[in-house]
Image: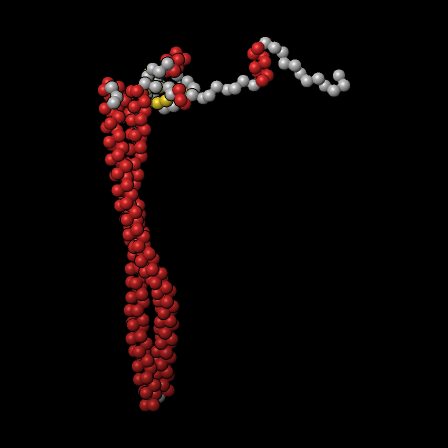
């Protein structure tokens, strides 16, 4: 294979690997962002559970005050029962006592329901806090892993950059200019031809071009515009002729086995 063609193929391999590494490097910050988002979401859940607990505590404090108030009213009404003079007054006081007791029962039921909600929220809060710690640790590990991977990718890109510059110096300037222009438009600048087909666009090449490529020429694909080359090392090995095929090619008839009893 011509040296220019060989160096162009190597250069394209280097360029594709550099592009792959660049894409990997660009994707790394997203891993940190994802870990940060998961931690932030769990921290928000923790804050919500804590706020809910505080609200329930405030609600029970309010309920306790109201219950105490109704209990005091009940005590006063019961104290007045000894000084009533008419049945109407006694009935009115009894009505107030019953109403206050009913309110006490209702408020105590609300207080019990609040306690049940608080128990559930305490469990939620404890779980959320544990997950916050776990996610914070995961974020630290992600940052460490991403930093190490970024360092590794930087080293690989530096090595590929040096190899790239060395290869570009070995390629004829006019050929390198064509390669750069095509690669900028197509993503790749050179393509191998296999079985009379451009591997870049999968379109067939003309028989005359196919013959020229197999003679070592560097041509241009009529369909995609990429530089075309043929690699004899990639050519399939010739098939070994079968015995019957070989006998047919020599012109001799193949004798069929004689059947028993014939």
Residue 113, compared with residue 154, is above or below; it is: below
Q: Of residues 50 and 138, which is closer to you in this image?
A: 138
Residue located 36% across and 24% down the image: 200
Residue 201 is drawn in which quadrant? top left
Q: Indicate the position of residue 256 as horizontal and vertical percent values.
A: 67, 16
Residue 88 visible (yes or no):
no
Q: Of residues 119 and 210, which is closer to you in this image?
A: 210
Q: Of residues 64 and 217, which is closer to you in this image?
A: 217
Residue 1, compared with residue 100, is above or below; it is: above
Outermost right residue: 261
Residue 208 is drawn in which quadrant? top left
Left or right, residue 218 beside residue 234: left
Left or right, residue 213 beside residue 160: right
Residue located 25% across and 22% down the image: 170
Left or right, residue 258 beside residue 231: right
> What count of labels does the image hold?
0
Q: Of residues 176 and 242, which is closer to you in this image?
A: 242
Identify the image quadrant of the C terminus: top right
Identify the coloring. secondary structure
Residue 1 is drawn in which quadrant? top left
Residue 245 visible (yes or no):
yes
Residue located 26% across and 34% down the image: 159
Q: Indicate the position of residue 114 as horizontal and vertical percent values.
A: 35, 68
Outermost top residue: 251
Residue located 32% across and 52% down the image: 138
């Amino acid at each position: 294979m011509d040296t220019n063609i060989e160096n162009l193929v190597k250069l394209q391999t280097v360029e594709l690997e550099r592009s792959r590494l660049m894409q990997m490097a660009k994707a790394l910050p997203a891993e940190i962002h994802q870990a940060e988002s998961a931690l932030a979401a769990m921290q928000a859940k923790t804050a919500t559970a804590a706020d809910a607990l505080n609200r329930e505590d405030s609600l029970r404090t309010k309920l306790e005050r109201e219950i105490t108030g109704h209990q005091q009213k009940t005590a006063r009404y019961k104290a007045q029962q000894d000084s009533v003079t008419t049945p109407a007054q006694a009935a009115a006081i009894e009505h107030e006592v019953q109403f206050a007791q009913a309110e006490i029962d209702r408020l105590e039921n609300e207080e019990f329901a609040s306690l049940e909600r608080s128990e559930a929220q305490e469990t939620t809060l404890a779980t959320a806090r544990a997950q916050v710690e776990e996610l914070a640790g995961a974020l630290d590990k992600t940052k460490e892993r991403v930093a190490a991977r970024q360092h590794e990718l930087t080293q690989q890109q530096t090595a590929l950059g040096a190899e790239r510059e060395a290869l570009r110096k070995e390629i004829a300037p006019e050929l390198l200019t064509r390669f750069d222009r095509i690669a900028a438009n197509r993503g790749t600048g050179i393509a191998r031809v296999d079985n009379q087909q451009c591997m870049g666009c999968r379109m067939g090449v003309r028989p005359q071009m196919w013959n020229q490529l197999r003679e070592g020429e560097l041509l241009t694909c009529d369909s995609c515009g990429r530089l075309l080359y043929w690699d004899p090392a990639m050519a399939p090995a010739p098939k070994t002729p079968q015995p019957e095929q070989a006998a047919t090619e020599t012109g001799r008839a193949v004798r069929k086995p004689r059947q028993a009893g014939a």
